[in-house]
C-alpha cells in the first residue's frame, strides 16, 4: 500500500516538477528505470510468495540500478553502448516477464 | 539407543516428517521459486534463500502484528523513498522521451536517411530561393525598364508634338523680322526663309504677323493674298512678319550668308532684321492632327 502510494507520489512529483534530464544521465536513466522496475516486480512476486524481505529488496533495487547503469557506461566506453543497453533491456525484460508470469499464476492460478 | 531405535520406527513416520516439514516449505519455496525463477534467476534465488528463514518468520508476522509494522517503518521508509525515486525518474524519462521527438531512439541508418532528406530539402529550398530572387530581380528591372520605356515614349511624344506643332516649345533661337521696304514681302520670301531655317536645323518655327500667328509645320503653305499680305495655312497675315525659330546656335549665320535669306529679301527691296540667338518661346500650337487615310505599318 505504502509502496503504491510512494510510486504515485513519485510520478506526481516528476510530472509537477518537470525537470529536464541532464545530458550526462541521458543514456543511463532509461536502463536504470527498467532495472528498478525489474526489482519492483521481483519484490512484488516475493511479497505474494510471502518471502518478501526489506533489506533484500532495497539492496537488489539499488544494485540492479547501479549494475545496469554501470554496464551501459562500460558499453559506452567500449563503443558498444547501444548493443549492451539492448542486451541489458532484453535481460531485464525477460526477468520482468518471468516475475509477472509468476505473479499472474499466483493471483489467477493460471 | 534401543529406545531411539524402537521409537524411530513409530514416530519415524511422525518425526521425520516434522523436521523436514519445517524445512520443506523452505525447500518448496526455494524449489517453487526457481520454476518461475529460472527467468528471474538473480532476483529470485536470493530472496528464496535469504528470505526463506525471514519469510518463515515474517510472513506470519507481517500481516497481523504491530511489531512488524514498527520494523517496517525503517526499511519501509527506504523502500518508499526508492519507489518515489523510481516513479519520479519514470515520469521524467517518459516526459523527456516524448519531448525529444524520438530522434535519440532512431538508428544510425535512419538518421542518415533523415539527414540526407533534410539536405536535399535544404538544397531544393536554396534553389527555390535563387529562382525567386532571380524572378524578383527580373520584375524589379522590368518595372524600371517599364519606367524607362514610358519615359522614352514620353520624350518621343514630346518631340513629335513639337514637330507636329501640338506642343509649345522653348529654347535658344532667333527671330527674323520682315517688313515691307520698296517692295512688299512676298510668300516666296517667307518660304525661302522657312526652308533656310529648316536647312540650318531649326526644330520649331512660328510666323507672327498683324492679324495672327501660325505655327509652321510640315503641311504649312504660304500664299500671297490678294490685296496685300500673306495667307499662311488659311490665316491672313500682314506685315511686318516675325518668324521665330528654335534651333542651333548658328541659325543667324545661316540667314546672313551671301545669297541667303537676308541677301535675297534685301535684293528684292524688302527689309529683314536677324536677331542674335537668344531664348525664345514658341507659344502657338495646333490641334492634334486627325489622319484619315494614312495608317502606320505595324
Image (tube, rainbow, N blue to C red):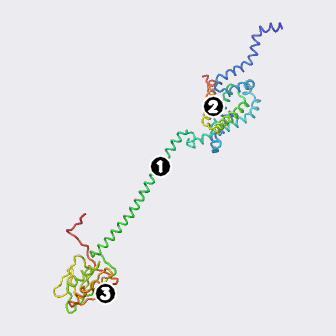
Quadrant assignment, res B284? bottom left
Label 2: state its secondary structure: helix
Quadrant assignment, res B280? bottom left
Output the chain of dot 2: A
Left or right side of B151 for B231: left
Q: Which of marks 2 and 3 is in front?
A: 3
Residue B235, given in percent of the width and then of the height, sits at 21, 82
Q: Which of marks 1 and 2 is in front?
A: 1
Output the chain of dot 3: B
Residue A92, label in figure: 2
Distance from disc 1 to disc 3, alpha carbons, whole Å, reads 74 Å
- From this view, report whether residue B266 is shown above or below residue B214: below
Residue B152, given in percent of the width and then of the height, sits at 34, 68
Distance from disc 1 to disc 2, alpha carbons, whole Å, reads 45 Å
Residue drawn at (65%, 31%) of the image: A38
Residue A98, given in percent of the width and then of the height, sits at 62, 27
Residue B11, label in figure: none
- Check disc 3 and report the residue beneath it: B275
Residue B292, given in percent of the width and then of the height, sits at 20, 69
Q: Residue furthest right?
A: B1
Residue nearer the viewer, A59 or B214: B214
- From this view, report whether residue B134 is shown above or below residue B62: below
Q: Are marks 2 and 3 on the same chain?
A: no
Label 3: state its secondary structure: loop
Label 1: few (<14), some (14–19) or many (≥20) C-alpha neighbours in 10 Å: few
- Check disc 1 and report the residue beneath it: B123
Amino acid at each position: 500500500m505504502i509502496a503504491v502510494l510512494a510510486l504515485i507520489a513519485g510520478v506526481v512529483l516528476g510530472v509537477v516538477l518537470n525537470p529536464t534530464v541532464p545530458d550526462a544521465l541521458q543514456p543511463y536513466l532509461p536502463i536504470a528505470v527498467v532495472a528498478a522496475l525489474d526489482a519492483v516486480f521481483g519484490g512484488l512476486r516475493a511479497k505474494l510468495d510471502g518471502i518478501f524481505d526489506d533489506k533484500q529488496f532495497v539492496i537488489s533495487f539499488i544494485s540492479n540500478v547501479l549494475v545496469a547503469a554501470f554496464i551501459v557506461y562500460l558499453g559506452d566506453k567500449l563503443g558498444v553502448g547501444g548493443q549492451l543497453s539492448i542486451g541489458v533491456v532484453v535481460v531485464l525484460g525477460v526477468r520482468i516477464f518471468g516475475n509477472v508470469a509468476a505473479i499472474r499464476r499466483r493471483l489467477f492460478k493460471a | 539407543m534401543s529406545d531411539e531405535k524402537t521409537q524411530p520406527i513409530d514416530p519415524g513416520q511422525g518425526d521425520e516428517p516434522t523436521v523436514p516439514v519445517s524445512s520443506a516449505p523452505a525447500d518448496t519455496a526455494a524449489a517453487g521459486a526457481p520454476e518461475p525463477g529460472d527467468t528471474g534467476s538473480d532476483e529470485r534465488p536470493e530472496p528464496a534463500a535469504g528470505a526463506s528463514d525471514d519469510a518463515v518468520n515474517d510472513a506470519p508476522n507481517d500481516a497481523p502484528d504491530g511489531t512488524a509494522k514498527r520494523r517496517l517503518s525503517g526499511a519501509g521508509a527506504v523502500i518508499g523513498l526508492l519507489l518515489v525515486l523510481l516513479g519520479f525518474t519514470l515520469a521524467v524519462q517518459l516526459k523527456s522521451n516524448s519531448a525529444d521527438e524520438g530522434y535519440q531512439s532512431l538508428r544510425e541508418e535512419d538518421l542518415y536517411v533523415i539527414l540526407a532528406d533534410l539536405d536535399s530539402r535544404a538544397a531544393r529550398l536554396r534553389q527555390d530561393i535563387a529562382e525567386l530572387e532571380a524572378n524578383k530581380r527580373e520584375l524589379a528591372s522590368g518595372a524600371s525598364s517599364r519606367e524607362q520605356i514610358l519615359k522614352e515614349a514620353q520624350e518621343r511624344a514630346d518631340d513629335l508634338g513639337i514637330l507636329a506643332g501640338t506642343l509649345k516649345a522653348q529654347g535658344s533661337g532667333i527671330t527674323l523680322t520682315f517688313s515691307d521696304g520698296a517692295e512688299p514681302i512676298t510668300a516666296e520670301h517667307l518660304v525661302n526663309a522657312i526652308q533656310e531655317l529648316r536647312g540650318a536645323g531649326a526644330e520649331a518655327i512660328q510666323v507672327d504677323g498683324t492679324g495672327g500667328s501660325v505655327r509652321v509645320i510640315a503641311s504649312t503653305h504660304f500664299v500671297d493674298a490678294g490685296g496685300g499680305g500673306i495667307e499662311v495655312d488659311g490665316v491672313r497675315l500682314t506685315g511686318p512678319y516675325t518668324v521665330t525659330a528654335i534651333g542651333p546656335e548658328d541659325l543667324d549665320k545661316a540667314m546672313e550668308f551671301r545669297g541667303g535669306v537676308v541677301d535675297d529679301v534685301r535684293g528684292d527691296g524688302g527689309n529683314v532684321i536677324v536677331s542674335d540667338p537668344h531664348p525664345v518661346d514658341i507659344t502657338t500650337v495646333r490641334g492634334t492632327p486627325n489622319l484619315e487615310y494614312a495608317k502606320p505599318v505595324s
